[in-house]
Amino acid sequence: MKPIWIVDDDQSIRFVLEKALLREDLPTRSFTNPREVLQALESGDDENGPQILVSDIRMPGGSGLDLLTKVKEKLPGLPVIIMTAFSDLDSAVSAFQGGAFEYLPKPFDLPKAIELIRRAVEESQREEVAEERMAAAPEMLGQAPAMQDVFRAIGRLSQSNVTVMITGESGSGKELVARALHKHSPRAGGPFVAINTAAIPKDLLESELFGHERGAFTGAQTMRRGRFEQAEGGTLFLDEIGDMPFDLQTRLLRVLSDGHFYRVGGHNAVKANVRVIAATHQDLEQRVKEGAFREDLFHRLNVIRLRLPALRERLDDIPMLARHFLQQSAKQLGVEPKRISDAALTRLATFGFPGNVRQLENICHWLTVMAPAQLIEPKDLPPEVAPSPTEAAAARAATPSTEVAKPATPDAAASTGSPAAIATSGTASVGPRSWESGLEAEALELLASGRHDVWDALTKRFESKLILTALANTRGRRIEAAQKLGIGRNTITRKIQELGLE
């Protein structure tokens, strides 16, 4: 593990922090002034570089704030904790603006200082993993099973020119999938041309797609190539195909059938060497039944169908996506990337995201601009993410009341595999957080009975309930249940056997 660098001209401060951190098995390296730190960084020894930098503000050899600025230029992801006297709180504000992780007021409480440093270490390690994933990340991100299915489909189609239909809700990333299909196809060397058929007025869409000859209509001063010609030898992505006017559907069908089209006002057929990928958020089968979409065109487009999951179906991907978008936003705005706490990510995971991945990207852009500190906490999230007090009260009222089941006999408590031992009961009305109170009451009762296996009995019941609930949520898929619980698949298999849940 890399050491924690301590910068302070006061030997007593350095000594106290060194000893306390070593007791926590955290290696340290101390400096008396900023100049020594910068010299050590210039040496380029990355293996012994800092995991965390803890620096005083006022030192004879230079300012801690100046050091912060220079360190951030060299190591933008390094968490820096600024130590400051109470009279320097204005400087602490400047420290935050310069990208400091946190400030530590002097005189400080040693346990709280160590807790803060440990939190910074954990954040640093999390960011290192996130950066490694980001560096190795492809053009699309996703670890959830639903996204892995999409990636596998893209791989299978990599050597094909077949027409593909992408379905999915608005904002779920359909154009990203289309670009990936193009990039990994034999046509990757050709152009990728995208057009949103719902965003262009009906009168202009025909000309946009097929081009026009000079004088074809008022204002057509010159011949213009349409999107089909622009995509020659490559891929044409037709987004929101379900909104295409009915008469243009006929022309599109003709191109897909024989590979030729006519410019508006033209008399010579133009050959189209183009792969078509279409996308829609609508139910095209229903549109066909309603007579709004040609059935023969539907079958022409629907050779291979890829369904893109909504973000609420891939909640495991939210942390990775959020960090990626925060990095992107910071790069676009030319500012220091902000970090997001686990509590804030948990809050995001409870949000429905009607706008899907695009909405998450917009939220991250908003946070880059509006969040007051470098570490984003739940209170920093935009108002639409956090439920209002009325909604929270309604959710609590709608929560079914449950009670930790009490065994009829002491032996029943040890019966970890039986449904009775982990069943819920509707006989008592309790609040949404009452499981803790129920656990406390259960523990007190078992302790009072003189038993000596209370820990094992309650732990087994707790683990059984968690695993069975997760398996019910994933319809029995053990690997997915393990991922959601945050344990390994070998662990869940072993637990199921030990607890008799087979």
Image (cartoon, rainbow, N blue to C red):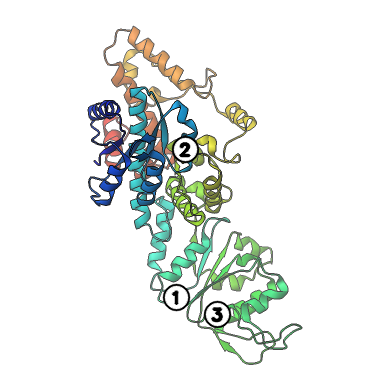
Residue drawn at x 57%, y 55% is 169
In this view, 343 is above or below 293: above
Q: Residues within 10 Å of mark 2 (few under 14, many from 20)?
A: some
Q: Residue at x 39, y 39 (%)?
A: 63
Upstream in the sequence, badge 1 or badge 3?
Answer: 1
Q: Residues within 10 Å of mark 1 (few under 14, many from 20)?
A: some
- Residue identifier under label 2: 346
Q: Which residue is mark 3?
A: 230
Q: Of helix, strand and loop, which one carries label 1?
A: loop
Q: Which residue is more in the foreground, 417 or 471?
A: 471
For discs 1 and 3, the disc positioned in front in the rendered view: 3
453 and 295: which is toward the camera: 453
The image shows residue 170 at horizontal and vertical percentages of: 58, 56
Q: Residue 329 at what x, y percent from top left?
A: 50, 53
Q: Horizontal placement of 12 versus 138: left or right?
A: left
The x, y position of residue 421, in whole percent, is: 38, 22
| Separation (CA) of disc 3 from disc 2 | 45 Å
- Residue under pointer 1: 161
Callout 3 touching callout 2 (CB < 8 Å): no
Marks 1 and 2, Cα distance to the nearest angstrom? 41 Å
- Residue shown at 69%/71% (left/top)? 245
Task: Kindly identify the amino acid type of the residue bearing the numbered disc 1.
Answer: Asn
Q: Earlier in the sequence, mark 3 or mark 2?
A: 3
